[in-house]
Amino acid sequence: MYEHRSLTDKIFLVIKGLCMGAANKVPGVSGGIVAFVGGFYEEFIYSLQKINIKAFKLLLNGRFKSFYRYINGSFLTLLLFGMLVSYFSVSKVLDYFLEQKELYVWSAFFGMILGSIYYIGKDFSYWKKKTIVAALLGLVVGIAISFLNPAKENDNLLFIFFCGMISVSGMALPGLSGSFILILLGNYVLLLVDSVNALYDTFSEIIIGNFSFTDNTERIRTLKILVVFTLGSATGLVTLSHILSYVLKHFKHITTAVILGFITGSLGVVWPWKKTIYKTANNGNLMLDTNGKEIIINYERFWPNTTSTETWWALFFVVLGVSILLLLDWYGKNRKRAV
């Protein structure tokens, strides 16, 4: 079904993986939106759905080529490769800009999500009673999630596995940010910052022949948490893909309407003009969790000051974000004409 790909297609697929990996790490941004807008969402879901009992039988019987073809291995390998590279490169750059130019990063993402609403909705002409209700339901849920308060950090391994299953929904469901869900569950820093940094440091040490990390109990604990989180993510992604492939096949228009509503509702999460509210003690000092990290209570959103130069730069990045989606739309149309 998806066998033949040109070199250009393969390069673009890795780039899309890079974008998905970066998006998944940013609270409020969904990797699923990248897949939806990039035009490979259905292929992504259906390919994951192929990881089933039949696939494992092929693998156990040593029929590796048949297994690889059956699960659309070329597509998944290139996409996942891009996502992994992103976690140790693009996302590091993104982390830097989030610290230095947070307003502009959020503005660009806000614009990209605005653009994605246009991109998904422009060709959707199935507005009937059922789809309107579905869109409103998605809108309400998206808004409700954006105003929930984060929980405390929890490193119980069963809870970590659960976090993996839930957070991966951001890759499968456009508009639902896995990173933001981890903030709500209280484990964003532990699972997407501390754990990833621990793995990065471990690889760096192994490359130079330094194995002293084996005596570092905190490092081993963090790596164990990352392994459990990864297993939970893989389980959640495969399980969710089976559910979504069925839903897309039998209720495609209703599903698209829900996604449109949900993405629109999630705009509150990535509203650029917001201030992070941290938990404070009675003496006014910031309260820290067990790992010495500030405890986030919520975000205080406010209307921008139109007389500020910074606001106009932020609006420029909103327009830039929208423009990126419009360029993707233009590229997709021209590519279809060329074919």
Image (tube, helix red, strand yellow):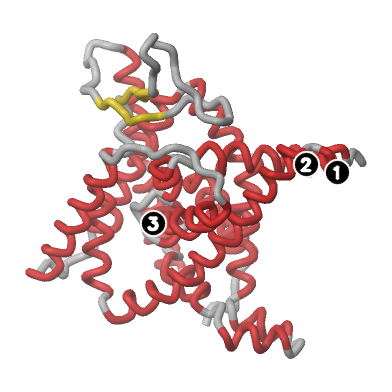
Q: x, y (%) of residue 116?
A: 32, 50
Q: Name the residue under label 1.
A: 206
Q: Quadrant of residue 179?
A: top left
Q: Is mark 1 on a helix, strand or loop?
A: helix
The reply to whether callout 3 and callout 2 are in contact (CB within 8 Å) is no
Q: Distance between the residues labelled 3 and 2?
A: 35 Å
Q: Is residue 315 visible to us here?
A: no
Label 2 sits on what residue type? Thr
Image vertical order of residue 194 relative to residue 277, above or below:
below
Q: Residue furthest front?
A: 282
Q: What element carries label 2?
A: helix
Mark 1 or 3: the one toward you = 1
Label 3 sits on what residue type? Val
How many marks on residues?
A: 3
Classify mark 3: residues with Cα within 10 Å, few (<14), some (14-19) or many (20+): many
Q: x, y (%) of residue 124?
A: 21, 65
Left or right, 11 with respect to 181, comes to right
Left or right, 154 with respect to 93, comes to left
Question: Relative to the observer, which residue lies in front, 182 or 155?
Answer: 155
Q: Mark 3 points at which residue?
A: 37
Looking at the rendered structure, which numbered label has been put on residue 202? Answer: 2
Question: Relative to the observer, which residue lies in front, 246 or 285?
Answer: 285
